[in-house]
Image (cartoon, grey):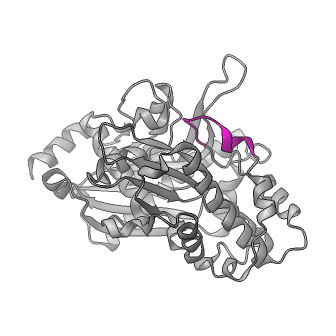
């Protein structure tokens, strides 16, 4: 019995698809990765997605059509993924899709109807119609309806799979946005999780702008490693109000917009591309360091594990090691969890909890008033729960 996890993150780089063996998970509480793939978005598609994330370029018509198109696209990519890896759809219990976040407002506004809300596109009915499989999706809205911020959701995965009885751990995701989960050694202590600030979003946006789209990211941090860091600029940027907000807190592209990146580049006027990338990378690391010092019991953290695209950036990993000289700073792979695929794997397991009717978020991290079962289910060919239980019964 397999589950497919699908993730499209804030970096807008592409679609991560994984297949995990639920039999291994049910029997051994272990993660067995059967197959994985990243489908890169071409420049045109990425730009179209990006337009839906900004008020000055999004329209109701385009959001509606992109919601349907992305669902169709996800379905087609999963069908191809199953074919390439010779995985029978009959063995797939469900597909769990995070969708693409285009708007996230964790606090709401002043008017009565301006309540905390979020929107992920990639309609699950379209995915189901293309794949003819059950789909679980739209996770974050459930947590927000229960008073949470709809993020960071990976704290549930971290607390359940990465706990160690003898050491305190911080699990730092560096995708488009950065977020951390503090997993204390004592299970009686509260897990703490929140967004630390930018992940790769500023670096990626800057290099794409400054190279006229010829480069999408700084491979391995090679260009940044050749630059000089402007520490004065970083200290000024750290005065942003987000870095002093109380917990729980989350952020996204709504804060780290194209205009925000342009302002940072303007302040570094005259600097080389390498210097700009070095400074933006160091800024990301500084937001992480500041967050740990301000919100976490740093003296109880022995190990820091990095996942997401940032774990592949050697320059960023070097700066992180320098920022925490008394801690072990390691990629998540050393714990047996593929760092690049962690989010897609986590959402596959969130979908599993949804199908079982079990809670799959952590109120202490999101701020929700209670544990709830996140996720909605679509299945165009019948009863998804009956099909799920039939597959489980065959184990």
Residue plotted at (71% across, 51% down)? 256
The residue positioned farthest toward the right in the image shown: 270
| Position in image of residue 124 (x %, y %) | 44, 44
Residue in view at x 48 percent, y 43 percent: 193
Give coordinates of residue 90: x percent, y percent.
22, 56
- Based on the picture, tell me whether residue 244 belongs to the magenta stretch: yes
In the image, which residues are magenta?
A: 240-250
- Is 334 rendered above or below residue 158? below
Q: Residue 338 location in percent, x, y?
A: 37, 67
Please, is residue 317 above or below residue 63 in the view?
below
Q: Residue 277 or 380: which is nearer the viewer?
A: 277
Does 175 appear in magenta? no
Q: Relative to the observer, which residue lies in front, 84 or 184?
A: 184
Q: Position of residue 200 (x, y in %)?
A: 62, 63
- Look at the image and tell me in which quarter the N terminus lies: bottom left
- The rendered magenta stretch, by its main secondary structure, is classed as loop
- In the shown orientation, is residue 353 left or right of residue 268? left
Instruction: Identify the image quadrant of residue 285.
Output: bottom right
Residue 159 showing in the rendered view: yes
């Amino acid at each position: 019995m397999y589950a497919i996890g699908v993730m499209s993150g804030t970096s807008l780089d592409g679609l991560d698809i994984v297949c995990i063996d639920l039999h291994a998970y049910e029997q051994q509480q272990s993660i067995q990765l059967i197959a994985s793939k990243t489908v890169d978005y071409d420049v045109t598609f990425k730009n179209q997605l990006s337009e839906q994330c900004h008020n000055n370029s999004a329209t109701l018509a385009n959001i509606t059509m992109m919601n349907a198109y992305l669902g169709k696209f996800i379905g087609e990519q999963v069908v191809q993924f199953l074919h390439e890896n010779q995985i029978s759809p009959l063995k797939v219990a469900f597909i769990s899709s995070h969708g693409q976040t285009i708007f996230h407002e964790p606090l709401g506004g002043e008017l009565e109807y301006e309540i905390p809300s979020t929107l992920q596109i990639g309609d699950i009915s379209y995915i189901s119609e293309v794949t003819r499989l059950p789909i679980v999706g739209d996770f974050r809205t459930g947590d927000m309806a229960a008073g949470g911020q709809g993020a960071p959701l990976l704290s549930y995965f971290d607390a359940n799979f990465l706990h160690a009885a003898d050491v305190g751990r911080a699990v730092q995701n560096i995708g488009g946005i950065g977020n951390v989960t503090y997993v204390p050694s004592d299970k009686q202590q509260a897990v703490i999780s929140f967004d630390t600030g930018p992940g790769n979003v500023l670096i990626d946006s800057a290099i794409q702008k400054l190279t006229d789209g010829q480069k999408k990211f700084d491979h391995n941090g090679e260009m940044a490693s050749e630059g000089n860091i402007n520490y004065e600029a970083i200290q000024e940027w750290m005065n942003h109000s987000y870095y002093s907000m109380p917990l729980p807190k989350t952020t996204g592209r709504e804060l780290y917009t194209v205009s925000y990146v342009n302002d940072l580049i303007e302040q570094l006027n005259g600097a080389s591309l390498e210097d700009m990338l070095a400074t933006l990378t160091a800024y990301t690391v500084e937001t992480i360091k500041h967050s740990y010092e301000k919100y976490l019991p740093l003296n109880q953290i022995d190990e820091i594990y990095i996942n997401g695209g940032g774990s592949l950036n050697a320059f960023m990993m070097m700066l992180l090691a320098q920022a925490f000289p008394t801690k072990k700073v390691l990629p998540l792979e050393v714990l047996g969890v593929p760092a690049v695929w962690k989010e897609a794997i986590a959402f596959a397991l969130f979908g599993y909890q949804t199908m079982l009717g079990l809670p799959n978020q952590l109120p202490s991290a999101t701020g929700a008033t209670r544990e709830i079962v996140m996720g909605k289910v679509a299945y165009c060919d019948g009863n998804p729960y009956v099909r799920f239980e039939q597959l489980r019964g065959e184990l």
